[in-house]
Amino acid sequence: MTEEILIAGFGGQGVLSMGKILAYSGVMGNKEVSWMPSYGPEMRGGTANVTVIISDDRISSPILSLVDTAIILNQQSLDKFENSVKPGGILIYDPNGITKRPTRRDINIYSIHAADEAAKMGLTKVFNMIVLGGFLKIKPVVQPEFIHKGLEKSLPVRHHNMIPENEKAIERGKEIITPEFLLN
Amino acid sequence: MDTVTKDDIRKPENLIYKRTNLLTDKTMSYCPGCGHGTTHRIIMEVLEEMGIQEKTIGIAPVGCSVLAYEFMNIDMQQAAHGRAPALATAVKRLMPEKFVFTYQGDGDLAAIGTAETIHACNRGENIVIIFINNGIYGMTGGQMAPTTLPNMKSSTSPYGRDVKLMGNPLKITELVAQLPGTLYVTRQAVHTPAAVRRTKKAIRKAFENQKLNKGLSFVEVVSNCNSGWKMTPNQANEWMVENMFPFYPLGDIKVNED
Amino acid sequence: MSMKELRLMKGNEAFAEAAIRAGADGYFGYPITPQSEVMEYLMAQKPHERTGMVVLQAESEIAAINMVYAGASCGKRVLTSSSSPGISLKQEGISYIAGAELPCVILNAVRGGPGLGTIQPSQSDYFQSTKGGGHGDYRLIVLAPSSVQEMSDFASLSFDLAFKYRNPVLILSDGAIGQMMEKVYLDDQRPRFTEEEIIKNTPWATTGKTANRERNIITSLNLDSHVQEEHNIHLQAKYREIEKNEVRYEALHCEDAEYVIVAYGSGARLSQKAVDIARAKGIKVGLLRPITLFPFPKAPLAELAGRVKGFMTVEMSAGQMIEDVKLAIECKVKVEHFGRMGGIIPSPQEIVDALESKLIGG
């Protein structure tokens, strides 16, 4: 099993930390992992993206032009990365703020209203965990027990009281992710 | 009066001065009349009197004193041009129980090494900086230094230093005295026995400060360069008194006792 | 291996942590992207409390490398890190360190140049790293990590090699290896040298002249040309010894290969994926990854040259290592280069396309 995931959105949406929790969960599940952020001027405000690879085998390139799954959280990233999904792969996006929806018909497309849901739950800080939950519903690459351990490892100890909220958000994400276009 | 023979002079009871063992037997390469030799001697005497030879690391720069390690009988590091205070910083921080000093000329300390000088002083490293100021690059053949006086001739200011074209001499000692990290800043000379005694006292005080972990001591020694100035040793000393001292007045500039 | 502490870390952080664990005595650096995490991580760790290690932010790259010179002169395990423009500034100091035969570790997280260039990953400092870098005839031992694990492993390895040969060791990394996170098994904490150990292991160090020995002098100055030439001959003999003993490389799928990609560091990671893609298409291609860039793995390349149709170097530069490959194989078969410059990382697919167009079809 090798799963290549690109997560992209605004800085501040928790893109990098979502990737980190996913990667740490992979480590806890005894998988090989890599977490490769974009950095540089883009990091200083504007868009942020990270490529996470989780695999049973040694990972070759941590930098990829095509991925199995793209998780997209803003319009700029959708414009930039829609074509980075392998044919037959998956694109997950939050429609919040999206004016031009994805148009490809050779990939599976899911939407998740994570921003709205986070506001409804009064938990805007765990917005990214709702998205992560949605992804894990479609691609259960890591078992829930390892997600728990991953949260423990990647969150500073002073934030460990937030773990139940994070897990609640992950569960909620699993419930609200919706297929928008599926290949047969 | 009876004739005094060689043998009389060599009698122990007639011994009035002995070269410190902390200088090697190597013949000094400095020009006759130059202040380096005297300054080397009094530093080594201070180390000997304090009994810290085994605990002292000296840093020699690029310049006339690049070969200081040939004459000083202690462990020494030879630094790249201008970097001696950076070396001293690392040595002292890695071995705080040792004594560390740099021995630098004006080109080294006040031109190419200005950043290292200012920052080591500003951090207040617990080291001693000995600064030989003769207003010229001696080693490379008498070029203009950052401390060359206005209108003073050198091989790169052959018609005299025109401050409009070549900039002003840098009084770096007054400058470092402004920094909160410096404890003791003084300017001395070695052209007369009395001056030598005062300079030795200043150097002793600088090392005592280090011993007490009090901070950075900076001792400037205004010196001559008879070769570079193209004078006899006596002329050079006279010229130094008449021209250098008014611009670089001798005495303590900053003395923090706490 | 499984007993070691497992963490998910950035390459730069893993290097910093590994340096502490390798028993480093001092780090001296100056901020520059993309490696500032090294000093940030060290400062956050309070190594002065953890192991007694000194960490100092210097006033410049120049001051930092000269602090390294001084620390190494005292027989201490000292290191610095920087990125390309900062490494250029350090070159005078590195030359002094090589001349005075001092052990130290230098990390270069290479970014695209020349000049201020870009902050994105590049491999354009190969010549500077492997051919000397500063003035005078000298060589650094150059290690090229291609994973976070190697960023950790090479910290202690570098100190060992540096002290074994009294020679500076350069770790040639880049922003990609430094910024990415991977699993890393950390070495156990090594004790720092005691003063007694330093006096015993590095009797040349300036630890203070005691009555039982002559004074120790650290210098790279030999005004007598004959003495300097003797020193040069000694240095060259040492470099030949290093070439004999310390070549490290990894060969992947080279057994049946008709073509071989030669790539190091992050370029090797991209190439590994390219090999997978090409093999899936039925192209028999292997990867030879030099781990030491000096000493360069000449012998395995020469051996491969006897049985493959051609080589392609993949470098994030205009092609620098290709010259060493050509020398190693004495131009017996075709050698091509593929790379991107300016901080652009080529995709594995681009590498496969280049392999097909330049080497196989060309």
Image (cartoon, rainbow, N blue to C red):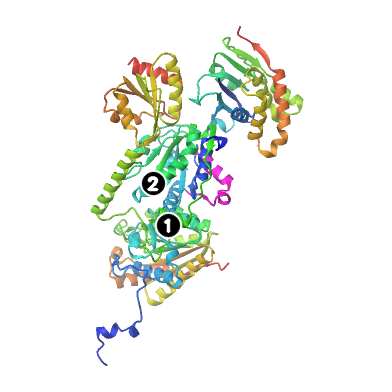
Q: Is residue B53 above or below residue C128?
A: below
- Residue B163 visible within the image: no
Q: Amino acid at mark 1?
A: Ile
Residue B245 lies in quadrant: bottom left
Structural crowding at the residue carrying mark 1, measured as other residues with C-alpha within 10 Å and reported as few (<14), some (14–19) or many (≥20)? some
Q: Position of residue A177 (x, y in %)?
A: 69, 17
- Label 2 or label 1, whichever comes before in sequence order: 2
Give the residue pinned by disc 1: C199
Chain part drawn in magenta: C35-59
Mark 2–mark 1 CB contact (< 8 Å)? no
Give the residue pinned by disc 2: C164
Tally of numbered tags: 2
Image mark 2: chain: C
Q: Position of residue C222 (x, y in %)?
A: 29, 54
Q: Which secondary structure, mark 1?
A: helix
Q: Amino acid at mark 2?
A: Lys
Q: Is residue C191 above or below residue C242?
A: below
